[in-house]
Amino acid sequence: MPITKGYQALVEEAMAQVKTYSVDEAVLLLSEPETQFIDIRDIRELAEGTVVGAFHAPRGMLEFWVDPASPYHKPLFADESKAFILFCGAGWRSALAAKTLQDMGMTNVAHIDGGYAEWVKVGAPTETLEEQKVRRQKKV
């Protein structure tokens, strides 16, 4: 069966429908308490590090973690005072994921153009998983 709409068309459609931040714009939101960065990359990709303060929500579980009717729901996603900024490796998966969340009814969602690769390229703040773990333990 031939593919009638490829990934590029899907990503382009999503990009036209979701709010997209450049890395420079997103960095300015890092210290905003109402902004939550969401790393949707695969667990294996996290060895490279992540955005400081990001919450990991693997792409394969995102819809289940967002939906309050799901047995896998994470209360973080029910916080309507938060703006959620998704990112992946290159900005493609996060564009598709942000569109899906919009389709689910979320209006407080965006993504980062260029993803984590662009974030690292411009020298934006990152942390290792170990640094993240230590930081979170200090908050408790």
Image (cartoon, helix red, strand yellow):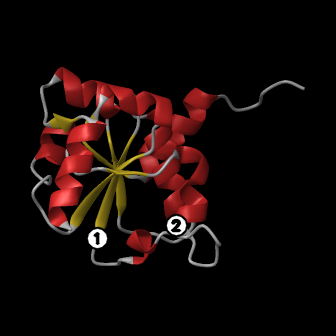
Q: Which mark is residue 66?
A: 2
For residue 140, above or below residue 113:
below
Q: Is residue 132 left or right of residue 79?
A: left
Q: Nearer the viewer, residue 127 or 125?
A: 127
Q: Which mark is residue 118?
A: none
Q: Can the viewer see residue 51?
A: no
Mark 2 crowdedness (10 Å alpha carbons): few <14, some 14-19, many ≥20 = many
Q: Can the viewer see residue 134?
A: yes
Q: Which of marks 2 and 1 precedes in the sequence?
A: 2
Q: Is residue 22 left or right of residue 48?
A: left
Question: In the image, what residue occupies the spot 58% across and 53% down?
Answer: 61
* Residue denoted by label 1: 82
Q: SS for tag 1?
A: loop
Instruction: Give the CA separation, mark 1 to mark 2.
Output: 13 Å
Q: SS for tag 2?
A: helix
For residue 13, above or below residue 116:
below
Q: Nearer the viewer, residue 20 or 78?
A: 78
Q: Is residue 69 left or right of residue 35?
A: right
